[in-house]
């Protein structure tokens, strides 16, 4: 429900702040005072188009802000979460329209695109009158309204699940068929690529191993030269380390005869000698293994060249080449078994199609049954609202899939395939005729302002228990009616207000007298400029305003008495 509304610098409104209550909120006021301006401003935060001409003269921007209680609205939270907007039991919508033509939208102080604000507004408010923000004038909502009326949500959810599974299998089949076509088209290329990779058949660590060995082979002469010099230094030269160590050991032994402390040095010298001998043995062994093999050198160079070529063609590393090879093998293997895979998926589609078709058939039957009830009840309510001799049709249509396009059709009943949506095979639309002898026409094409408001009201009346929108706004619902019909419209609004918050603009005392809360729009003039204000009335003020609606500008004791009777005040 709308709790609070602020409007700044919009048309005749300089500053307006008002709280709205639950139940039936009625707005009255003189013609031209600005009642519809308030509704126009409210429509801005519901995502309607902004017009810079509506910005108050000599101001830079217009601002409209509405605070809505969404504690009972189950549809809002998922939408806010999806768009990363903070959620609480209150949603604040704010729209700023600049004289420069720019428009900014905020939801709970988070900047959002206009489309998001409109999506949120669609879940909060249904505005009826001279505006386009009307859920019942959007054909796509008719099926939802019919399902809500008939309490078919469990059947719809069951079909959605079956539809989702079936769609998944059909997508899998399409993907398989496309892949089969692609693989067959490039089979020769794939086989050539696989033979080329198999001819080299690289292993994961091979390249690093080859590069290491190649480096050694390319430097075999230098290795031989350097290791031989090292061997001479360590062991084989006249002044080699091993010779010097032997000489040092002899001196240490002579010193040990004199001083026992040289025993430690002797052990260290012997240890050093053993290390040098071990090092010398390792060098000698390495020298014996040095290869001078032009054939092996050439083999390694060629092998690395082959691997490098594969890397350029099939990936930047051996691992990538191996992955590509495995993919080729899998695709070629799949190509040989495609028919079996495709038949397997087709069998799954048939099984799931039977399930979806059964649910769709049940849904269609229940919708047709509910449609008859809606039709008769709407006609009754329309008669009460002064539209006699009306005809109302809820058409539940099915569309056959054209011959030749049925292979992937989701629902089959009997021998026929049907166009399908996640809601079933039904396309629902409301049709109406309000004049004898006239054919019914689509509800969305009904043009009469006063008539369409009453049609909307009648639909809301029978669908009220299931309709999800918490706030209904009726702008000028009383056009072209009076007397008994006005009383009937008022009572319908009153009944509707038990399930929805209602905000309605009216000129009729019969409707105003039924308000839970009554507001008056007034135009204030200070000699220089005009301004519109909206204020909540006290009980005494309500009596006076209802009397004013009854008699015009001159309010008499008689009209005050009649107003009290209308308000049921003793």
Image (tube, grey):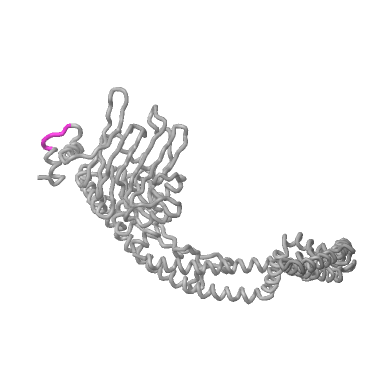
Q: Position of residue 512 (x, y in %)?
A: 22, 43
Using residue 444 as the reference point, say whether residue 234 is left or right of it: right
Q: Residue at the spot x=44%, y=48% of the render?
A: 116
The image quarter in which residue 479 lies = top left
Residue 41 horizontal/vertical position (percent):
36, 39
Residue 361 is at least partly visible in this image: yes
Q: For the view shown, which residue lies furthest in the left direction?
A: 570
Q: Nearer the viewer, residue 459 or 58?
A: 58
**Residue ranking furthest to the top:** 527
The overriding secondary structure of the stretch rendered in magenta is loop
Q: Residue 261: percent from the left, percent from the top? A: 71, 66
Chain part drawn in magenta = 554-558
Instruction: Say which of 126 and 17 sits in front.
Output: 17
Q: Position of residue 234 (x, y in %)?
A: 84, 65
**Image check: 271 left or right of 502?**
right
Determine if the magenta segment contains residue 131.
Answer: no
**Total numbered labels:** 0
Relative horizontal placement of residue 479, taking residue 82 as reference (left or right): left
- Left or right: where 202 falls relative to 452: right
Residue 217 visible to an observer of this rendering: no
Task: Name the residue at the front extreme.
Answer: 258
Task: Work out which quarter of the rendered image holds the C terminus and state it.
Answer: top left
Q: What residue is rendered at 28% in x and 26% in y?
A: 525
In terms of image quadrants, where is residue 311?
bottom right
């Amino acid at each position: 429900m709308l709790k609070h509304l602020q409007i700044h610098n919009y048309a005749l409104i300089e500053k307006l702040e008002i709280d709205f209550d639950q139940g039936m909120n009625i707005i009255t006021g003189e013609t031209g005072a600005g009642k519809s301006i308030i509704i126009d401003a409210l429509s801005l935060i519901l995502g309607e188009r902004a017009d810079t001409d509506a910005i108050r003269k000599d101001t830079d921007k217009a601002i409209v802000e509405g605070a809505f209680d969404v504690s009972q609205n189950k549809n809002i939270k998922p939408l806010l979460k999806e768009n990363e907007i903070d959620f609480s039991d209150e949603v604040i919508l704010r729209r700023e329209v600049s004289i420069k033509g720019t428009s900014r939208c905020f939801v709970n102080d988070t900047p959002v695109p206009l489309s998001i604000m409109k999506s949120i507004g669609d879940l909060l408010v249904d505005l009826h009158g001279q505006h386009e923000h009307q859920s019942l004038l959007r054909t796509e909502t008719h099926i939802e309204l019919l399902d809500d009326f008939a309490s078919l949500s469990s059947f719809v959810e069951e079909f959605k699940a079956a539809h989702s599974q079936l769609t998944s299998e059909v997508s899998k089949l399409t993907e398989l068929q496309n892949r089969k076509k692609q693989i067959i088209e490039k089979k020769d290329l794939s086989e050539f690529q696989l033979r080329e990779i198999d001819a080299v058949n690289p292993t994961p660590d091979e390249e690093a191993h080859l590069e290491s060995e190649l480096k050694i082979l390319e430097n075999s002469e230098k290795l031989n030269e350097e290791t031989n010099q090292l061997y001479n230094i360590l062991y084989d030269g006249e002044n080699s380390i091993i010779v010097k160590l032997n000489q040092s050991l002899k001196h240490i032994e002579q010193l040990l005869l004199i001083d026992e402390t040289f025993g430690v040095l002797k052990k260290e010298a012997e240890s050093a000698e053993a290390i040098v001998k071990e090092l010398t043995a390792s060098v000698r062994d390495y020298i014996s293994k040095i290869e001078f093999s032009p054939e092996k050198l050439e083999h390694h160079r060629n092998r690395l060249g082959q691997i490098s070529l594969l890397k350029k063609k099939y990936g930047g590393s051996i691992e990538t080449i191996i992955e590509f090879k495995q993919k080729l093998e899998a695709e070629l293997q799949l190509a040989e078994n495609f028919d079996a895979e495709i038949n397997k998926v087709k069998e799954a589609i048939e099984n799931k199609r039977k399930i979806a078709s059964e649910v769709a058939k049940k849904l269609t039957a229940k919708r047709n049954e509910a449609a008859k009830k809606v039709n008769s009840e709407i006609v009754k309510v329309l008669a009460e609202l002064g539209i006699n001799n009306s005809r109302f049709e809820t058409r539940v249509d099915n569309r056959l899939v054209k011959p030749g396009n049925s292979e992937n059709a989701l629902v089959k009943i009997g021998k026929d395939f049907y166009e399908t949506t996640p809601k079933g095979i039904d396309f629902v639309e409301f049709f109406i005729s309000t004049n004898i002898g006239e054919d019914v026409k689509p509800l969305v094409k009904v043009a009469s302002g006063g008539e369409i408001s009453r049609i909307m009201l009648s639909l809301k009346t029978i669908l009220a228990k299931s309709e999800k929108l918490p706030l209904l706004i009726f702008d000028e619902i009383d056009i072209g009616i009076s007397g008994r019909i006005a009383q009937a419209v008022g009572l319908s609004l009153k009944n509707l207000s038990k399930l929805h918050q209602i905000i309605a603009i009216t000129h009729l005392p019969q409707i105003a007298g039924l308000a839970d809360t009554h507001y008056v729009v007034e135009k204030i003039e200070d000699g220089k400029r005009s301004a519109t204000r909206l204020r909540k009335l006290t009980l005494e003020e309500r009596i006076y305003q209802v009397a004013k609606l009854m008699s015009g500008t001159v309010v008499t004791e008689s009209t005050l008495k009649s107003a009290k009777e209308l308000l049921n005040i003793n």
